[in-house]
Image (cartoon, rainbow, N blue to C red):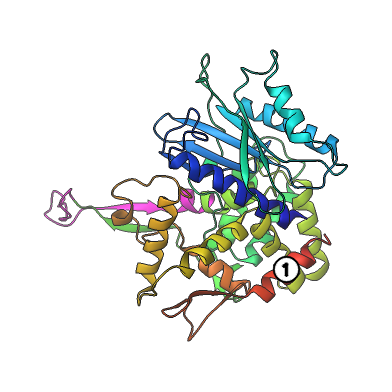
Amino acid sequence: MAQEHDLGAEKTGGFILSQIRKSNSVYKQVFSPSISRIGDWGWPRPDFVCYDDENKVTYALEYKPPMQSKREYVCGLGQSITYLQHHTYSGLIVPEVADDGFPIAEYFRDVLLSDAMHATPISLYSYNPNTFDVQILKAIENVRTGAKVKPSQQVSKTFWCWWRDMSHFEVYDLLRLSFLYSSESGDTYTDHIFPEFWKKLTTGKTFDFEGNARKVEASKTKELLDKDGNPILDENGCPATKIVTSYGSYKQNYRIPFEQLGLWTSKEGKLSELGYRLLEIGNKYGPDSANFKNAIAYLFLTVGRHLDLIHIISDIQDSYVMIDSSMEFKQLLDIELTERGLIGKRKPNAVKTDSKGSYVRDELKLWNKFGLLQCKNNRYFDKDKGLTFNWQKITEVLTNGKQW
């Protein structure tokens, strides 16, 4: 059910986004064509979130699947209202009728157009469950005024979960440490969890995906350069250097996925119910077990919305004339995702300053390590096919994941 829900949200939300970007007079409402999809990992968590870069506002959409009860759809309206606490505007997407044939979309239209609700900055859309054709029933006509609404602090330029080389062994280590310090107050991640994990990282006591010891350098010497890239000399005429520590960047890299996947109830490192369940699987079967790895894969495919991204990449590459370079392919993906409004606006020098040069980068390694991406001659990219996804494995992970 979760996968059908997410696919429906992707289809309907993507259609609405595309029509606003085309300045379709029926759908554009108060938004500019500079709108794009973003991520929001706070609570409550909308199904599809957009950011209008020109107007500096956010738009949170709630999608409800077909064949649900009237009660479920009323809950959806309530969710749309709560989103206005963290977003400038919101919208509700419902099928034309409820499971009992009641015309739920028309009913909500009457509610939102009533004297009590017509000024509420909420859009209403209906869709046909067979074709997913979307119609707007109530538009946002007025710019929201009054106190400036600040988007959730967890809004990000990518709608999918951020991941940087954290192995399943390290996921287990952090879950275990979170449980160990669960009785501590305050910011347990900063004060207890990460300092202990950092000792493991810098002494070779953590493991990469293959089970090899991973040892991170706590600091390194970096040569100082001027704005033209030339070495800066010290008072003795020697190249000037400074000591650079990687503590802060590693702390951030390991924290973000735990927050975005909902494994913590807060930034402080307190385990959520989902985090406890994942730890139980790791304790029962072991961190290197298929059960534990599949459970992690299920989370980033569903909660982390990597499945959405995989579907989108598959659609994009089907229209490509394949090229030889993997890096060029990833940069073209960036261009296509940007044109479709599916990633946030990058800074003009982003590719020049980013050593990996694209938004979609470590995700490929992650998918490969969990068996979701097939390699040819130890390469992710095939010039004749692009990326080859292992749909049999993806289906297995999604099917088995429902059990826990």
The image shows residue 365, relative to residue 75, as above or below, that is below
Provide the major secondary structure of the magenta segment: loop
For residue 211, which quarter of the picture?
bottom right
For residue 372, which quarter of the picture?
bottom right
Name the residue located 73 percent from the left edge and 40 percent from the top edge.
184
Q: Quadrant of the N terminus?
A: bottom right
Q: Magenta includes 166? A: no
For residue 189, which quarter of the picture?
top right
User: In the picture provided, is 381 more to the left or to the right than 241?
Assistant: right
Q: Is residue 170 at all visible to an observer of this figure?
A: yes
> Which residue has dot 1 on it?
397
Q: Nearer the viewer, residue 258 or 247?
A: 258
Under circle 1, the secondary element is helix
Residue type, numbered disc 1: Val
Q: Is residue 87 at all visible to an observer of this figure?
A: no
The single residue placed furthest to the bottom in the displayed view is 377
Q: Nearer the viewer, residue 286 or 67?
A: 67
User: In the picture provided, is 37 more to the left or to the right than 9?
Assistant: left
Q: Nearer the viewer, residue 148 or 214?
A: 148
Q: Position of residue 339 (x, y in %)?
A: 40, 51
The image shows residue 114, relative to residue 150, as above or below, that is above
Q: Position of residue 303 (x, y in %)?
A: 67, 52
Name the residue located 80 percent from the left edge and 55 percent from the top edge.
277
Q: Position of residue 329 (x, y in %)?
A: 39, 68
Name the residue located 60 percent from the left edge and 52 percent from the top edge.
257
The range drawn in magenta is 226-251
User: In the picture provided, is 311 more to the left or to the right than 110?
Assistant: left
User: In the picture provided, is 252 more to the left or to the right than 372?
Assistant: left
Mark 1 crowdedness (10 Å alpha carbons): few <14, some 14-19, many ≥20? many
